[in-house]
Amino acid sequence: MTEQNKIRLIQNADNRFFYDRRRNMIHDRQCTLLDTLNTDDLVAVDTLAPGFVTRKKLCPTCKRKAAIRNGMHGRLRTSSDQMQFFTDFFGAVGASTCDLARMFIYDGGSVKQISNDCIEIHDKQDTWRVIASENELSLLHNNYEVNDDYSRTFGGGFHVQGNLKHSSFHSIVETICTYSFDYHKRILAYNKRIQLLHFETGLAIANNYVCCDKKSLLFNYYTFIDIQGLAGSRGTIRGMRILECTVRDGYAMITCRIPIWRRKEFESMMGLLKDKAYEEQRFDYLDVCEGAVPQPA
Ligand SMILES: [Zn+2]
């Protein structure tokens, strides 16, 4: 390849990356090593798709630039001003090259500048804003409403993705890359199911409280719905006798006969059950969205 063709190849604004076939290595268009390579080995590459990258090496010299550039938008993708802005921004917030590659290459995220201290990241279905103020980072998440079928409508605007203690850019990347609305959907469906059961049977759910529906001189009778099978149906609940246990579509309706002298014990045991259920399943999806996200088991 002539020197002229080499300049043409490297300066072509459409060429974001170069793949060095001989060394099986990918370079950013601004890599300082490009001049030392034989241009006959170079192939221009537009986008670093995960499948393309995993079989090749990313040049250690320019990996950071390559990751950032892969996330940059449309005509700005070869703008050196934009590259300078993002290089400065990610440097200031302490972003590691590894996190940038994770987000902009392997997770397919993209980034644009909103202002001097705010960037917007789009990853899968969701849009996020990272604001770098003097001493801290904050993360905003796009607003959405949940429809009856658990799909989402994005109505515009952002809410603070709070309570995450975003002390590091790394934790922000973790939040963005692991965010899953499918998990929210499971919780929504679960809460809806509890409401439905409550409506259909008129009974309290074990997770909430137990209803005492009958008393005698010696016994209290409790009937409740055990939606998760936490109470078990093997004749006793922690040594207390189950009179009747009807297993229905995914839940059990349990009637217990509890000697009145063991009532307190039973109720505190159900209280423990409630806490357990609460921690495992029952929280509002918005809390999950806003707060520290417990990962599904
Ligand atoms: Zn390079």
Image (cartoon, helix red, strand yellow):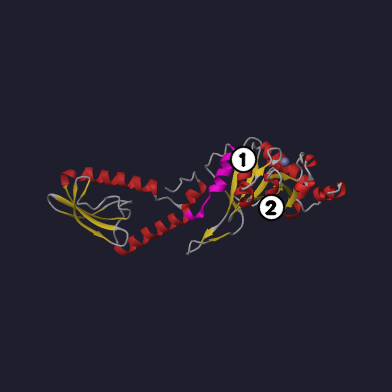
Range shown magenta: 168-182
Is 109 included in the stretch rendered in magenta?
Answer: no
Residue type beneath disc 1 = Cys
Q: Position of residue 264 (x, y in %)?
A: 22, 43
Q: Position of residue 46 (x, y in %)?
A: 72, 53
Secondary structure beneath dot 1 equals helix
Q: Does the rendering let one see residue 283?
A: yes
Secondary structure beneath dot 2 equals loop
The residue lying toward the viewer, choosing from 136 and 248, is 248
For the stretch drawn in magenta, the main secondary structure is: helix
Quarter of image, ligand 1: top right
Q: Of label 2 and label 1, which has the lower sequence position?
A: 2
Q: Position of residue 105 (x, y in %)?
A: 63, 48
Residue type beneath disc 2 = Thr
The residue lying toward the viewer, choosing from 246 and 105, is 105
Q: Does the rendering let one see residue 108?
A: no
Label 1, on which residue? 98
> Hey, which quadrant is residue 269 in on the image?
top left
Label 2, on which residue? 47
Q: Position of residue 116 (x, y in %)?
A: 72, 43
Q: Around disc 2, counting alpha carbons within 10 Å, would you say few (fewer than 14), some (14 to 19), or many (20 or more)?
A: some
Question: Left or right: 211 with respect to 112?
Answer: left
Q: CA distance from mark 2 to mark 1?
A: 18 Å
For the point 56% across and 40% down, the residue is 171
Judged from this view, the residue extending furthest toward the top is 135
CB of residue at label 2: within 8 Å of ligand 1? no
